Amino acid sequence: MGMKIVQEVIDGVMVLQLVGRLDVLGSQVALDGMLNSLTPAAQGKKIVLDMSECDYVASSGLRTLLIAAKQAVRLGGKLVMAAPQPLVLDIITTAGFDEVIELYPALPDAIAAVDSATALAAKAN
């Protein structure tokens, strides 16, 4: 199975669900999809990667996640991950990516965290 990205907005937060394998082939599809959502028009946007349907992450997939997270930061936004399957969680934590990209056990947790961070930033301005 390849990689597919399902994009939706939940409670005002952009959610990108990665479906499939984030391997060499899937990584390019995922990167293209994530970077299409992380354009200058999306400046300050908070994005949640729903990893619940991603069943494998290769080193190329980790690179893709890092590129997308850095692009989000460059644009003043934030990218977090939610609900990884056990194998994917193990790969992400073993590689130390949970120290680089915030990781939440469930999609609602990630949406709430990103949404509250947006509300706090707006309140500070």
Image: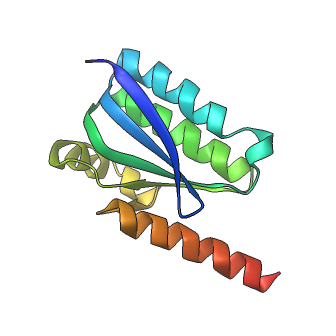
Residue 101 in view (yes/no): yes
Residue furthest out toward the bottom: 123
Q: Position of residue 54 (x, y in %)?
A: 29, 37
Most foreground residue, 58 or 81: 81
Q: Quadrant of the N terminus?
A: top left
The number of callouts visible is 0
Q: At x 60% / y 61%, what residue is drawn?
A: 12
Q: Is residue 46 left or right of residue 76?
A: left
Indicate whether 113 appears above or below 45: below
**In this picture, is 73 found above or below 16?**
below
Q: Quadrant of the C terminus?
A: bottom right
| Applied colour scheme | rainbow
Residue depicted at x 57% and y 40%: 68
Left or right of 108 in this view: 84 = left
Above or below, 21 against 70 in this view is: above
Q: Is residue 35 left or right of residue 123?
A: left
Residue at the spot x=35%, y=52% of the render? Answer: 96
Q: As drawn, which residue projects farthest toward the top?
A: 25
Up the image or down, 64 lies above or below 97; here it is above
Asked whether the viewer can see residue 60, the reply is: no
Residue at 35% x, 29% y: name it.
Answer: 59
Image coords of residue 40 (percent x, y)? 79, 41
Instruction: Please state which of residues 92 and 121 is positioned toward the viewer in this rendering.
Output: 121
Spot occupied by residue 46 in the image (x, y as percentages of width and height): 61, 57
